[in-house]
Amino acid sequence: MANCNHSKLKAWVDEVSAICTPDQVYWVDGSEEERVRLEKRAIARGLIIPLDQDKHPGCFYSRSNPNDVARTEHLTFICTDRMEDAGPTNNWMSPEDGYARATEFFKGSMKGRTLYVIPFSMGPVGSPFSKIGVELTDSLYVVLNMRIMTRVGAAVLAKLGSDGEFTKCLHSRSDVREDHRLIMHFPQDNTIWSVGSAYGGNALLGKKCLALRIASWQARREGWLAEHMLILGVEHPGGKVEYITAAFPSACGKTNLAMLIPPEGLKAKGYRIWTVGDDIAWLRVGPDGRLWACNPEAGFFGVAPGTNSKSNPNAIKTVRKNTIFTNVLLGDDLTVWWEDGEGAPPASGVAWDGKPWKPGLKDKDGKPVVGAHANSRFTAPAGQCPSIAPNWEDPKGVPISAIIFGGRRERLAPLVMEALDWNHGVYLGATVASERTAAQVGKLGEVRRDPMAMLPFCGYNMGDYFGHWIAMGSKAKNPPKIFHVNWFRKGADGKFLWPGYGENLRVLEWVLARARGEGKAEKTPIGYLPAKGAIDLTGLKVDSGTMDSLLEVKPEEWTAELEGVKAFFDKFGARLPKALWDQYEGLRERLKAKVAA
Ligand code: GTP
Ligand code: SPV
Ligand code: MN
């Protein structure tokens, strides 16, 4: 056993061993020597395949069970004494039932396997804002991914000392059967139990389970925010850097925005983007009354399809080495490829589901067969990103000028709008709706409410969560301005109206100008929209008719949208803050006045 003198931790490892009955227990120390040794072991067991080491040094391929390729929200539970503390948007179970049901699946689940003990830190080791977890897992794939996504090993154990607090994270892939799968959170016990899945947010327990669900519960008690947000810095001509956080639902553009490269025209002016985080932000009020944001992760678990050197050149450079690719296409030449990826596909290979694949392959109905799963991912160290901010690991975080919410909406939501004030901004966040993507199991394209992009990740009653957001606005003397964006509005031809990606910087420019009290806007019933010409379109082929469509506000459509908002708010009963009903009424009145005018 490693240097552990934490008696509660040791007792817990013994307790879990008695239930899961592994053949042996191994304490992860986080060293480079260990990485090489564990990679060799994973290769020998067929868990990972080394890629062509000239083209992809330090890179590996992994394929998960075809029934296990995305988060399973219907099998994810918040286990609290009282059902109303989990709230209407979470699946609930009592802690007794939760432990009992999951224990059935954990019993003997590690027989013939090694139990790995992974001490990890979310946030730099030793920062007062960091949180420590220990994941016990029988998956070597999880160990290798956690080594990239979090800070692991001896330094964390040392920090924990003999009685430090930590989140107990228990994971077993067990037999990877959907009917034996449960992702359980016990926030009252600072505990996570996940069984039956070995993929992404279901299994890398530091990520969504700890850094969002458990952390959001803790954040409410401790007076901070744990959010599904990217963090980026915009360096202006002259060198001044301002920071933005943005919350978009899964697979709606956080990684892409976080690594944005300015289009030629803006680059020439001297703009540059610095990446601080691409998925999770922890925000606190600083001594200056501003909100300061930290990225608790150490790596990126990013969506592969659609990533190419035109859409996201920084991501392509980030994954050149030391990266694990999961469920993409594996070429027979030991390269990897995905749809809308880099260059031509290999002549032949094996698709994400383990079946042989060739370019142009069609199914029996003549439809193209994809090589990479739509939710296939890369796991890469954040430090390898060419745009990583020099201060990305600064324990105090970065000061935030603007918070952006967004969703994927074909219609209705304009390219960008600014909230009238903090509470209206919380309303904009609380009413985000978005079309479902491949990042979670379910019907693609269906529009669902995804407040603050946290629907699947809020560890407590979302009514209370909205109240906490309202309260944070008064706690911060200089809160950031709040905005809403939609890169995904479509025209009558079904095509995206806005070019997106790097061009999104044009929108960020306006957002930051507004946050400084500059930038021209027009007040509409739904918020401030950019005045004509306020978004710099120099060098961009978007005509003024398209721009009008992107910024069009149809009061009748927004009035119809209110029905869905009301039905959603009603679910929370008395737990919905009055301030949000006031926002709802205010918007209804403004729309009514507009329609009458
Ligand atoms: P998670 O990791 O699941 O939380 O996702 P994410 O929010 O980081 O999403 P990501 O940046 O990986 O984007 C997912 C997909 O959205 C990409 O593959 C692109 O196809 C698409 N996308 C991202 N940015 C834009 C944009 O500006 N415009 C358009 N049209 N599509 C975009
Ligand atoms: C998401 O789904 O929002 C992700 C991927 O970032 S996962 O880690 O699987 O949650
Ligand atoms: Mn995410």
Image (tube, helix red, strand yellow):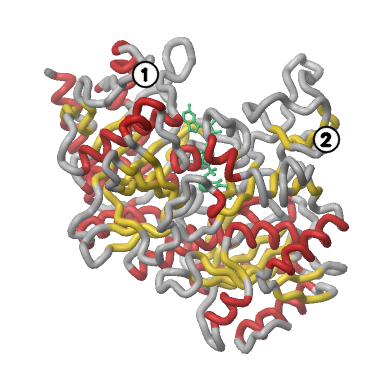
Q: Is residue 481 left or right of residue 304?
A: left
Between discs 1 and 2, the one toward the N terminus: 2
Element under label 1?
loop
Q: Is residue 484 above or below residue 397?
A: above
Quarter occupied by residue 465: bottom left
State the residue in front, 179 or 378.
Answer: 378
Name the residue beneath numbered marker 1: 540
Name the residue beneath numbered marker 2: 333
Q: Is residue 505 above or below residue 583?
A: above
Q: Is residue 125 left or right of residue 268?
A: right
Quarter occupied by residue 202: bottom right
Please give the count of numbered marks on the rendered protein: 2
- Under mark 2, the amino acid is Asp
Q: Is residue 193 above or below residue 507?
A: below
Measuring 34% from the left and 51% from the top, which residue is drawn there? 573
User: Is residue 574 shown to the viewer in this render?
Assistant: no
Check the picture and name the quadrant holding the N terminus: bottom right
Measuring 36% from the left and 47% from the top, which residue is drawn there? 233
- Under mark 1, the amino acid is Leu
Q: Is residue 244 left or right of residue 62?
A: left
Measuring 34% from the left and 37% from the top, which residue is drawn there? 271
Q: Which mark is residue 87?
A: none
Check the picture and name the quadrant holding the C terminus: top left
Measuring 85% from the left and 74% from the top, which residue is drawn there? 23
Quarter occupied by residue 398: bottom left
Report x, y in % for residue 59.
72, 48
Report x, y in % for residue 438.
60, 36
Query: Label 2: how many residues lie within 10 Å, few (<14), some (14-19) or many (20+)?
Result: few
